[in-house]
Amino acid sequence: MKQISALALAVALFPLGAVAQEEEGTSLMEEGAKLFFRGLLSEMEPALRELEGLADEIEPALRSFAEEMGPALRDLMEQVEDWSAYEPPVVLPNGDILLKRKRDAPPLEGLPPPEDGEIDI
């Protein structure tokens, strides 16, 4: 019986100790989380610095690509109404890129529906 009452007393006093510790500062869980994230940040720092350097190297090429291809991509976006009606692009060995419409896609406005076996190139 003494063991049960001692256990009950310890369980009752445990939250009081945790509350007192939280009032003084941070809890053990918070301290553990802070230490974990500090360690994680120190491990990731070299990779993040490499990524930053890579981004600095790639930035001029991306700006050039956007300036040159931006108008063409804008025109393409205006012409294609529903991207879900197309299969993923296929790159041919000569570098050409094909955008094929899915067979079950609705026909384009102004064009007759393709006959069976007919391929529009």
Image: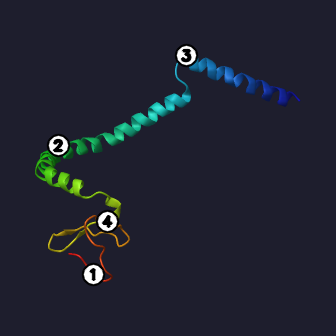
Q: Which mark is residue 99?
A: none
Label 4 SS: loop
Provide the residue designation for mark 4.
Answer: 86
**Disc 4 residue type?**
Tyr
Which mark's residue is nearer the viewer, 2 or 1? 1
Residue type (three-letter) at the residue carrying disc 3: Glu
Residue tagged 3: 24
**Identity, as a three-letter code, of the amino acid under mark 1:** Glu
- Disc 2 versus disc 4: nearer the observer: 4
Quarter of the picture holding the N terminus: top right
Q: Of 79 and 30, which appears nearest the observer?
A: 79
Q: Earlier in the sequence, mark 2 or mark 1?
A: 2
- Which of 17/102 is in front? 102
The residue positioned 12% from the left and 46% from the top of the image is 60
Give residue 48's position: percent from left, percent from top. 28, 42
Residue at the image position 84 percent from the left and 30 percent from the top: 4
Name the residue that disc number 1 marks. 118
**Front position in the image: 4 or 41:** 41
Here the colouring is rainbow
**Which x, y percent locates residue 36?**
45, 36
